[in-house]
Image: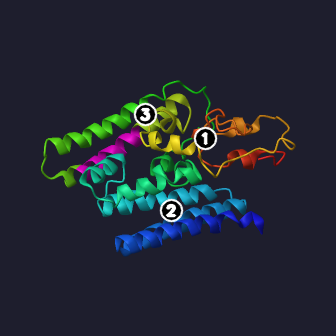
């Protein structure tokens, strides 16, 4: 039963967050919200342990569609990075600020970039494209993410400084336009570089939050050197090109790991 240890642990963490936010914010929504996300992610991990082929995709769809369609389009919450800046400048700890704190700022200290692998609604669509394994060498253009990060910050800052009216409506429109641009750019880059995760590697502004905390992530893929046969298959199947055979925090592309576990699934010696 040891192999089933992780799903209840992940669920317990989300239950703790759900109950804490429910009681401190006096809002029952947070209880249901984080319980749902926790159960979805835990289900995906459980199905993976059961060797179900599409386990991670189920978690992606359950969480991604919920956040994009329900929270974003129906409830009108901007869950993109612009929404985070908006609530942060408003001095309100709710919606996107809570989401970012849990999933993208402090959460990665525990589960790294697991958000990117199991919950991101942008990657949810991009992972349907044909290049799950990168077909071209990694490009040295990761600096673009800092430009998009700064652009999102300046956009929201300009709205506050100019005292624009109807800012909530602007943020909702920005959420729609932003998602359309994300999908369009993501698909174009995936086809151009033959790499589904090109957007995640070079453009996504959220990774500016994710990467530093992921360096210290408690949950990591490690390698049992006594079982490793140095076949290199783990590196070939990794969508983020992480060297999981290296135990150090400074391993190649170490902060890029999305915990998709393709390396674990394809390791012939069960060394990972």
For mark 1, does the 10 Å Cα neighbourhood hold few (<14), some (14 to 19), or many (20 or more) residues?
Answer: some
Q: Is residue 36 visible?
A: no
Relative vertical location of residue 245 with respect to residue 101 in this rendering, above or below: above
- Vertical comparison of 59 with 140: above or below: below
Of callouts 3 and 2, which one flags the residue occurring earlier in the amino acid sequence? 2
Percent across and percent down for residue 158 are 20, 39
- Residue 88: where, in percent of width, then height? 30, 51
Secondary structure under tag 1 reads loop
- Residue 120 vertical placement versus 150 (above, below): below
The residues bearing labels 1 and 3 have C-alpha atoms spaced at a distance of: 21 Å
- Which residue, given by chain and number where applicable, does mark 2 sit on? 62
Real-space CA distance between mark 3 and mark 2, rounded to the nearest whole angstrom: 27 Å
Magenta residue check for 176: yes
Residue in the image at 62% along x and 30% along y: 135
Comparing 161 with 78, the one in front is 161
Disc 3 marks which residue? 145
How far is disc 2 from disc 1 in space, using C-alphas?
20 Å
């Amino acid at each position: 039963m040891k192999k089933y240890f992780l799903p209840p642990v992940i669920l317990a963490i989300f239950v703790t967050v759900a109950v804490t936010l429910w009681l401190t914010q006096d809002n029952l929504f947070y209880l249901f919200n984080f319980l749902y996300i926790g159960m979805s992610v835990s289900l995906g991990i459980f199905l993976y342990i059961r060797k179900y082929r599409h386990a991670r995709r189920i978690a992606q769809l359950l969480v991604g569609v919920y956040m994009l369609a329900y929270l974003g389009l129906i409830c009108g919450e901007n869950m993109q990075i612009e929404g985070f800046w908006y609530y942060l400048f408003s001095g309100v700890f709710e919606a996107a600020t809570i989401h970012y704190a849990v999933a993208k700022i402090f959460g990665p200290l525990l589960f790294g970039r697991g958000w990117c692998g199991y919950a991101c609604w942008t990657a949810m669509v991009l992972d349907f494209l044909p290049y799950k394994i990168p077909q071209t060498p990694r490009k040295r253009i990761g600096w673009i993410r800092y430009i998009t990060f700064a652009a999102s910050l300046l956009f929201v800052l300009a709205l506050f400084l100019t005292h624009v009216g109807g800012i909530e409506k602007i943020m909702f429109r920005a959420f729609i336009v932003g998602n359309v641009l994300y999908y369009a750019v993501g698909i174009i880059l995936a086809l151009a570089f033959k790499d589904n995760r090109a957007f995640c590697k070079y453009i996504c502004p959220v990774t500016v939050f994710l990467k530093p905390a992921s360096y210290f992530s408690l949950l990591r893929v490690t390698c049992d050197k006594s079982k490793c046969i140095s076949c290199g298959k783990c590196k070939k199947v990794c969508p983020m090109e992480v060297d999981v055979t290296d135990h150090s925090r400074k391993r190649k592309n170490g902060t890029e790991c999305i915990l998709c576990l393709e390396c674990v699934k394809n390791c012939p010696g069960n060394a990972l």
